[in-house]
Image (tube, rainbow, N blue to C red):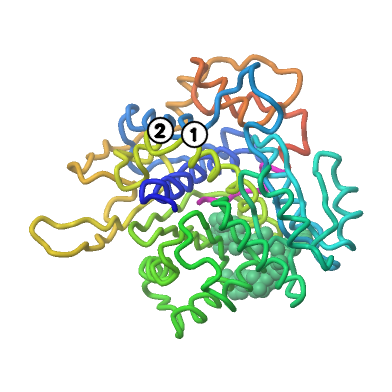
């Protein structure tokens, strides 16, 4: 059973994704313009805070080393892909590799398999989801997977959904972290008990999926004037699973804390951006849980973290002195202060990109783009700031930039 710290670590992983997505969102338009737009700060915090935050990101990135074997840094399975939808599972599965997983599997309906296989040789595609032995076929792979992403391009066919129900049961029995997205959330809305109390579940509903889920679980429409409270309540009603409500501002909660990320990203509202998020999250939740509470300071509630740059607020549930129960504070500062220690007073003005460009030395030219994983590790060995790592991603790999540029997802 997952400890509280373990579950909180999953949420800490979500904070990491918020930061990484800031990084991921930097590709596309010229870097400085995006930095200016994405990281422009109204109130800057100390460089130390920025360093703390980047340290959280670095902490969960598993070290690259020549002693590792294939798959050790992440083997992710995507459950989805049907006759109509083949792009979504591809976007989710390839995102897992681009973030830094070693292997990415897609378990899809037989009709979708040849199409998804044709998209990329990097994906291991299993045409089993519509087979009579689908659950057994997937279950064979579960011992070799670190996390599952369930739902991208799944569709709503009852037979497929029944198979996915069995796959989720088998995954829970093996304590495998699951990210549930898209039509996987359609299934959860029909059977909330399927994941109730499973603290290694992370749900990533968009606006529509959230209101459907909220309605199904809490038997009534969400309060659109209290989006923070709605996410908190839904998480609590589902037994404190982590809920990431995607939108103009991403709102996350594990039933104890609420974290809001308003990091500016792509203004496109094209299909597939949520799929990029869920695939990336599959890797990062695994890494955050693998890193453990000591690396993520026990999870969000214990982190002395002031998020630098992205306007991330939190309604951290704090036990007011002398009160009998937890209270939710409403966010005042545009920055996230996650510890009960006295509020860090933001210093006026300033822009992160000036800090980063000051820090970042001329990046060495790399013959080919590598995963962000590589660069974040490289950064740890005393490189420049995260920006240098990002600059190292070769602009000569348009498919990488296009992929990273699309994916603005703050979780
Ligand atoms: N290329 C592909 O294969 C893609 C497949 N997809 C799959 O398509 C299936 C259905 O996903 P959808 O997201 O379309 O379905 P949803 O049921 O989540 O959304 C239905 C429609 O609601 C509308 N909508 C979305 N956000 C809204 C908002 N904030 N306010 C008002 N209306 C809003 C959109 O037009 C959307 O198509 C999922 O399985 C998903 O994974 C999508 O991921 C898109 C890309
Ligand atoms: N109105 C918005 N303004 C800015 N960013 C947004 C907006 N809506 C969503 N986003 C961002 O885009 C990302 C994807 O959200 P979206 O609502 O498109 O997911 P989705 O519908 O599941 O996508 P998909 O088409 O892949 O299923 C989210 O992480 C969110 O941060
Ligand atoms: Mg979606």
The spot of residue 352 in percent (x, y) is 43, 33
State the mark number for residue 354: none
- Residues in magenta? 403-411
- In the rendered image, residue 301, in percent from the top left (x then y), is placed at 31, 48
Task: Give the CA distance from mark 2 to mark 1.
Answer: 7 Å
Mark with earlier residue (2, 1): 1
What residue is shown at x 61% (from left), y 55% (from top)?
A: 267
The verdict on residue 406 being magenta is yes
Tell whether 46 sits left or right of 272: left
Q: Dot 2 lies on which element?
A: loop
Q: Which residue is mark 1?
A: 60
Image location of residue 137, percent across then percent down: 78, 56
- As rendered, which of 34 and 191 lies closer to the eye? 191
According to the picture, the residue beneath numbered tag 2 turns out to be 295
> For the residue carrying disc 2, how many other residues have a C-alpha within 10 Å: few (<14), some (14-19), or many (20+)?
some
Q: Taking 165 as reference, is 44 left or right?
A: left
Q: Are marks 2 and 1 in contact (CB under 8 Å)?
A: yes
Q: Is residue 369 magenta?
A: no
Name which quarter of the figure residue 23 lies in: top right
Image location (x, y in percent) of residue 308: 38, 38
Quarter of the rendered image showing ligand 2: bottom right
Q: Residues within 10 Å of mark 1 (few under 14, many from 20)?
A: many
What residue do we see at 40% from left, 41% from top? 41
Residue at 80% x, 64% y: name it.
Answer: 133
How many numbered marks appear?
Answer: 2
């Amino acid at each position: 059973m997952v400890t509280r710290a373990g579950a909180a670590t999953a949420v800490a992983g979500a904070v990491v994704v918020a930061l990484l997505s800031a990084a991921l969102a930097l590709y596309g338009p010229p870097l400085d313009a995006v930095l200016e737009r994405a990281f422009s700060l109204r109130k800057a915090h100390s460089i130390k805070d920025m360093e703390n935050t980047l340290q959280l990101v670095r902490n969960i990135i598993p070290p690259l080393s020549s002693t590792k074997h294939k798959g050790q840094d992440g083997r992710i399975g995507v459950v989805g892909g049907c006759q109509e939808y083949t792009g979504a599972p591809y976007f989710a599965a390839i995102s897992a590799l681009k973030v830094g997983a070693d292997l990415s599997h897609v378990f899809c309906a037989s009709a979708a398999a040849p199409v998804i296989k044709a998209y990329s040789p990097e994906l291991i595609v299993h045409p089993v989801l519509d087979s009579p032995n689908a659950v057994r076929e997937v279950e064979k792979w579960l011992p070799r997977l670190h996390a599952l992403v369930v739902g991208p391009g799944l569709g709503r066919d009852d037979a497929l959904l029944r198979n996915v129900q069995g796959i989720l049961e088998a995954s829970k029995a093996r304590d495998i972290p699951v990210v549930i997205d898209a039509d996987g959330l359609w299934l959860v809305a029909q059977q909330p008990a399927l994941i109730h109390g499973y603290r290694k579940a992370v749900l990533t509903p968009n606006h529509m999926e959230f209101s459907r889920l909220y309605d199904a679980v809490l038997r009534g429409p969400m309060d659109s004037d209290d989006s923070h409270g709605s996410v908190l309540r839904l998480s609590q009603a589902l037994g404190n699973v982590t809920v990431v409500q995607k939108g103009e501002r991403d709102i996350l909660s594990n039933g104890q804390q609420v974290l809001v990320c308003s990091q500016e990203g792509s203004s496109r509202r094209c299909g597939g951006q949520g799929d990029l998020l869920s695939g990336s999250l599959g890797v990062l939740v695994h890494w955050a849980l693998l890193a453990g509470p000591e690396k993520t300071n026990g999870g969000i509630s214990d982190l002395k973290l002031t998020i630098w740059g992205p306007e991330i607020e939190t309604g951290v549930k704090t036990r007011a002195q002398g009160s009998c129960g937890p209270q939710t504070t409403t966010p005042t500062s545009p920055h996230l202060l996650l510890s009960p220690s006295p509020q860090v007073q933001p210093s006026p003005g300033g822009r992160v990109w000036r800090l980063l460009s000051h820090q970042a030395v001329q990046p060495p030219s790399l013959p080919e783009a590598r995963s962000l994983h590589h660069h974040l590790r490289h950064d740890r060995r005393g490189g420049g700031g995260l920006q240098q790592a990002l600059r190292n991603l070769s602009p000569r790999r348009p498919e990488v930039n296009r992929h990273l540029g699309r994916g603005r997802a703050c979780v």
